[in-house]
Amino acid sequence: MRSGSDTRWLRLGVLLVAVALALSFPSMAPSPYEITVGIAILNYAVLSTSWNFVGGFTGYISLGHGAFAGLGAYGTGLLVTKAELPPFAALFAAAAVVAALAVPVGYAALRVRGASFVIVSIALVLILLLVFQSWASLTGGSRGLVVPRPFPGMLRSEHHRTFYFLFLALLAVALLVWWVIDRSRFGMGLKAIREDEDKAQSLGTPTFTYKLVVFVVSATFTALAGGLYALWFGDLDPVFQFSILSGAYMVLMALLGGVRNLYGPLLGALVVGYALEYAKVEFGDTPLHLVVAGLLLGVVVTFMPDGVIPAATALLGRFRRTGETSIREVTAAELRERREENDTTEVSSERSST
């Protein structure tokens, strides 16, 4: 009990320190560029956490989740430029539209499993890429779409600082929703699907309904991240917005930290996001940042298939068990009590056997 209480206090302390660092980062950043890197990492964190609603709970690996981010970005941009909606009203309206579109998409895609589901998710990205590239009269085609800044009178440094906190708030909401689902009966059903979908269905779990609901939740948060990115960056390109690499990065980040852990995608986003941004700065437009991503994926699959957080937890557990059995940390009184308990247990077992 004491060990469990200490662990909870330790987790709470680490969480408070992480929150304090995240909130104070803009004031500690030496230049606006570091804040933009922080925004990019937070965007990655929201996207990977959104992906983890499906991948972590159900075990369905989607490489096409970037399609929902692209739809959210273009939906927000088009509602601002064509329908002249206020920026943040357009953001939530676009997320609602993407959630509605995710119902028929999920209804079709979630009827297959394994490699078939991966192929369907990739096909969704490629189809949307062709549509948004070809429909130039609406989307701008290969020229892209320019989204007006939501705070036109604000200096660029303040613009970045504001969006840093907006992304941070969106990440906090996504983590809170994931945490609530993880501790609910709905979450238990999703985990049963992940472990053995056929057995879960035979025991009465409405597996398809559960998968569809969490798929829509995941698509909604992904669209919100994409729409917020559109308002921040202001320049949309269909090749970038509907890229298979976006979905691959989400999977890599979640796998690196641990898909079954609340903070796994966040840790993965910190590592992978910083590595990608560093590679882009050092090597420019060369594809070497893809080499960095590939190396990280190889390290994770080879040495930490369950992720960094589960591996670190298992390592700490081994050290804790080793410490508990060390003679130097056990007093003579504790040894005497254990010996008396063992003697009592042996006498009771002998009487029951006779």
Image (cartoon, rainbow, N blue to C red):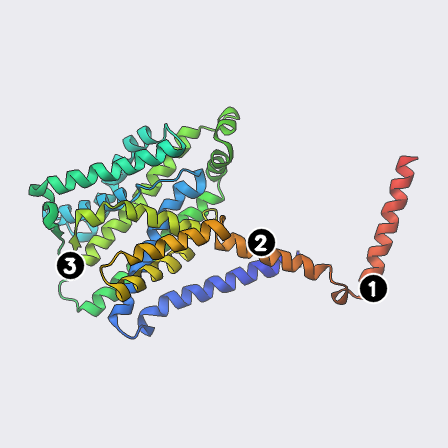
Counting residues from the start of the chain, the first of labels 1 and 2 encountered is 2
**Dot 1: element:** helix
Labels 3 and 2 touching (C-beta < 8 A):
no
At 25% across and 69% down in the image, what residue appears? Answer: 33
Percent from the top left, x then y, of residue 261? 48, 50
**Label at residue 113:** none
Residue 214 percent coordinates (x, y) = 38, 38
Image position of 232 (left or right of 291): left
Along the polypeptide, which appears first: circle 1 or circle 3?
3
Where is 340 relative to 204, above or below? below
Residue at x 35% of width, y 54% of height:
293
Task: Say whether residue 334 is left or right of residue 27.
Answer: right
The amino acid type, in three-letter code, at marker 2 is: Ala
Q: Distance between the Cα atoms at labels 3 and 2?
A: 47 Å
**From this viewpoint, which residue is outermost toward the left?**
137
Residue at 16% across / 56% down in the picture?
Answer: 234
Q: Amino acid at mark 1?
A: Ala
Residue at the image position 51 percent from the left and 64 percent from the top: 13
Residue lying farthest right? 354
Q: Is residue 241 above or below residue 23?
A: above
User: Which residue, given by chain and number where applicable, does mark 1 sit on?
Assistant: 333
Element under disc 3 = loop
State the separation of the CA atoms marked 1 and 3.
70 Å
Which residue is labeled 3 in the image? 149
Dot 2: within a 10 Å radius of its alpha carbon, few (fewer than 14), some, or many (20 or more) residues? few
Q: Which mark is residue 314?
A: 2
Question: How many marks are shown on the rendered structure?
Answer: 3
Structural distance between the alpha carbons of marks 1 and 2: 30 Å
The C terminus lies in quadrant: top right
